[in-house]
């Protein structure tokens, strides 16, 4: 009889899995995929390899491609609005500890005047992961996120 693998939180630190893999809420032998509408799948006896296999599957790749296109579209739309002559914008950040990945995370939010809607708009802009949280680390990540 083969041994069933238990979900390992260390896998969530891997850049390959960080954006989509989640621990199943009550079954330690399963993982969930946020890209595939929360689909749960058995880890079986291959553990981490099961995540890689799911990631390389057609359904997951199609969902990732659609998400990437949507994110790129909205990111370009925000950058375009911020690049309009005379556009004033502010950038704020929220730095917090992510329990899922056991690492500090910085989220950038931009606020700008949307000339299409003729109103102020606030949008998520970028997320970055910090090793350390000294002031110089925060500044480095903040500038990297806006680059
Ligand atoms: Zn998936």
Image (cartoon, rainbow, N blue to C red):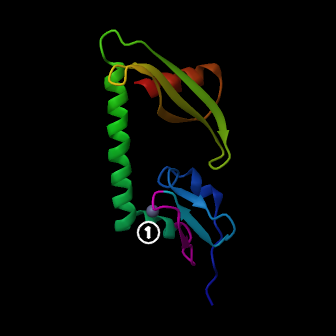
Query: Residue 33's spot in the image, x, y percent?
Result: 51, 61
Query: Residue 120's spot in the image, x, y percent?
Result: 45, 20
To which residue does mark 1 refer? 53
* In the image, residue 86 lies in the stretch drawn in magenta: no
In the figure, 9 relative to 104: above or below? below
Camera-nearest residue between 75 and 57:
75
Q: Secondary structure at mark 1?
A: helix
> What secondary structure is the stretch in magenta mostly built from?
loop
* In the image, residue 43 lies in the stretch drawn in magenta: yes
Q: Which residues are magenta?
A: 35-48
Assign the C terminus to one quadrant of the image: top left
At 58% across and 66% down in the image, what residue appears? 31
Q: Is residue 81 left or right of residue 135?
A: left
Query: Residue 96's spot in the image, x, y percent?
Result: 66, 34
At 37% across and 34% down in the image, what residue appears? 75
Quadrant of the image occupied by residue 105: top right
Camera-nearest residue between 141 and 37:
37
At 32% across and 32% down in the image, what residue appears? 76
Extreme residue toward the front, this view:
118
């Amino acid at each position: 009889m083969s041994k069933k693998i238990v979900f390992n939180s260390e896998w969530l630190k891997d850049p390959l899995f960080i954006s989509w893999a989640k621990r199943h809420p009550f079954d330690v032998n399963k993982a969930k995929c946020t890209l595939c509408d929360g689909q749960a799948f058995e880890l079986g006896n291959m553990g981490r390899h099961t995540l890689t296999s799911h990631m390389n599957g057609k359904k997951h790749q199609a969902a990732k491609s659609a998400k990437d296109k949507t994110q790129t579209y909205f990111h370009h739309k925000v950058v375009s609005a911020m690049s309009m002559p005379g556009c004033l914008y502010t950038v704020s950040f929220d730095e917090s500890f992510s329990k899922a990945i056991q690492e500090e995370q910085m989220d950038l939010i931009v606020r700008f005047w949307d000339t299409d809607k003729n109103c102020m708009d606030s949008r998520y802009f970028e997320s970055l992961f910090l090793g350390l949280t000294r002031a110089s680390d925060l500044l480095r990540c903040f500038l990297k996120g806006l680059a």
